[in-house]
Image (tube, grey):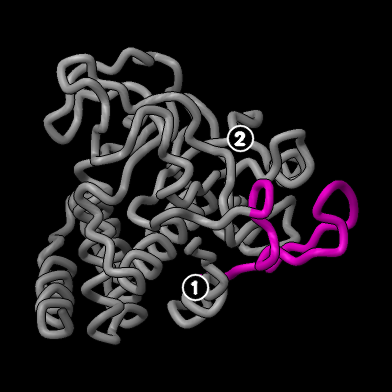
């Protein structure tokens, strides 16, 4: 029996993640909503992994055209979700565009460790599409994740991923992977894959750090205090910046550091 992830919009909305439910107006899926779409009418064999990608669109600008090719290219859907960086101001940065609840083409060839004869992560060579959700982002190689717009996109990517993994009981280690991990290997006890170097996305993110971050957010969501914790972290960030400015001006940063300590204590109580 195949698996269709038709509840993703509900999961994301409940977690406070902005999302848009896409529909198709042409091509083989014309007249269908994202909930009815899977490559060749197929759902997932299992759902055990989430792969993060970038769409390789031009850096430092919004590229809403990427959504079009994901929906309408020859092997569409090319990924199940696209996380935008505002679509030139039409949406909040970090809005999730839901493209397919069923199977999508995103992982491609990979997963073959010559030492093991394949079956890395208990997935056959080139078989990741059947067991993983592919999330594309409006991002490219060498593009920074710094700045309020890109940071909002990254925070949303992490939060939405955490919400889905929590709902489907998936542990980020090893359940969260970058596309490059599937093609290159050298992670989770795997050697160098035969497809090493085929992909480099998602760029600029350390997988160990991202797994830990997503795990933490999962716990926060489970505790029902995610929004409060997120707000407190933003306040810590602002007070850290004020402390640095005070120190640079030759003034005492003590009061800001005291605020940071108290804010951290509140986070500990919430988590």
Front in this rendered view, residue 76 or 153: 76
Q: Is residue 20 magenta?
A: yes
Q: What x and y, as percent, mark residue 266? A: 15, 82
Q: Nearer the viewer, mark 2 or mark 1?
A: 1
Q: Is there any visible trace of residue 30 in the rendered image?
A: yes
Q: To which residue does mark 2 refer? A: 60
Task: Tell me if residue 151 comes above or below residue 60 in the rendering.
Answer: below
Dot 2 crowding, Cα within 10 Å, few <14, some 14–19, many 20+: some
Q: To which residue does mark 1 refer? A: 12
Dividing the picture into quadrants, the one containing residue 207 is: top left
- Local secondary structure at mark 1: helix
Give the distance between the C-alpha atoms of the residues marked 2 and 1, in whole angstroms.
Answer: 26 Å
- Exactly how many numbered labels are in the figure? 2
Residue at (49, 73) in percent of width and height: 12
Dividing the picture into quadrants, the one containing residue 73 is: top right
Q: Is residue 14 magenta?
A: no
Q: Which residues are magenta?
A: 17-41
Sequence-wise first label, 2 or 1: 1
Q: Is residue 55 left or right of residue 234?
A: right
Q: Is residue 238 left or right of residue 42?
A: left
Q: What x and y, as percent, mark residue 200? A: 42, 24
Residue at (11, 77) in percent of width and height: 268
Q: Are marks 2 and 1 in contact (CB under 8 Å)?
A: no
Q: What x and y, as percent, mark residue 126? A: 42, 29
């Amino acid at each position: 029996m195949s698996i269709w992830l038709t509840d993703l919009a509900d999961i994301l909305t409940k977690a406070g993640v902005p999302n848009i439910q896409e529909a198709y107006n042409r091509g083989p899926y014309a007249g269908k909503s994202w909930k009815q779409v899977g490559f060749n009418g197929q759902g997932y064999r299992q759902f055990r992994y989430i792969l993060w990608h970038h769409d390789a669109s031009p850096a430092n600008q919004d590229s809403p055209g990427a959504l079009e090719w994901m929906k309408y290219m020859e092997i569409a859907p090319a990924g199940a979700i696209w996380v935008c960086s505002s679509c030139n101001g039409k949406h909040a940065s970090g809005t999730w565009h839901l493209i397919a609840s069923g199977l999508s083409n995103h992982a491609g060839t990979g997963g073959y460790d010559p030492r093991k004869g394949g079956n890395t992560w208990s997935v056959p060579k080139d078989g990741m599409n059947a067991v993983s959700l592919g999330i594309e982002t409006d991002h490219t190689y060498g593009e920074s994740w710094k700045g309020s717009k890109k940071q909002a996109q990254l925070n949303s990517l992490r939060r939405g991923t955490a919400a889905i993994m929590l709902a489907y009981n998936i542990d980020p280690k090893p359940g969260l992977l970058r596309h490059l991990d599937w093609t290159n290997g050298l992670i989770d006890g795997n050697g160098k894959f035969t497809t090493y170097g085929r992909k480099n996305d998602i760029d600029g993110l350390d997988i160990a750090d991202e797994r830990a971050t997503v795990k933490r957010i999962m716990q926060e969501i489970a505790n029902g205090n995610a929004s409060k914790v997120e707000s407190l972290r933003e306040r810590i960030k602002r007070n850290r910046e004020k402390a640095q400015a005070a120190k640079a001006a030759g003034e005492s940063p003590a009061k800001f550091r005291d605020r940071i300590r108290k804010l951290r204590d509140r986070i500990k109580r919430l988590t």
